[in-house]
Image (cartoon, rainbow, N blue to C red):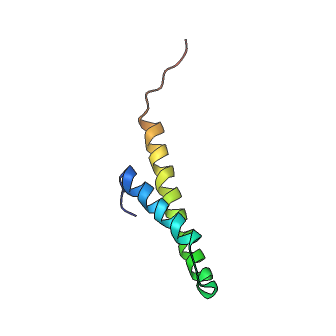
Amino acid sequence: MSRLSDVQLYGRAAALARKAKFAKFPALIPAVAREAIQEAAEIIEELAAREVTRCLEQKTTEKQ
């Protein structure tokens, strides 16, 4: 997954939430669920990567 801006990532998560909430045809729910789970995993992976980067770049101070 390419690096998304915060706004793009939020928009993708919001669209995913709408897609899952408004799945209308019971026969399609397994497919929608599968897609939603995959996309949610990608979003979580992106957020985790950002958090790791943020933590690594953060200056640390040691109490002496």
User: In the image, residue 29 lies at what x, y percent?
Assistant: 61, 80
Number of residue marks = 0
* Residue placed most toward the observer, 44 or 60: 44
Q: Is residue 20 visible?
A: yes
User: In the image, residue 15 lies at what x, y percent?
Assistant: 47, 65
Q: From the image, which quarter does the C terminus lie in?
A: top right
- Which corner quadrant of the image does residue 40 belong to? bottom right
Figure check: 52 above or below 16:
above
* Residue placed most toward the observer, 1 or 27: 27
Which residue shows up at 55% across the image and 15% down it?
A: 63
Which residue shows up at 44% across the image and 32% down it?
A: 58
Figure check: 14 above or below 48:
below
Which residue shows up at 50% across the image and 66% down it?
A: 16
- Which corner quadrant of the image does residue 24 belong to? bottom right
User: In the image, residue 7 lies at what x, y percent?
Assistant: 38, 52
30 left or right of 43 in image: right
User: In the image, residue 11 lies at what x, y percent?
Assistant: 42, 59
- Which corner quadrant of the image does residue 8 belong to? bottom left
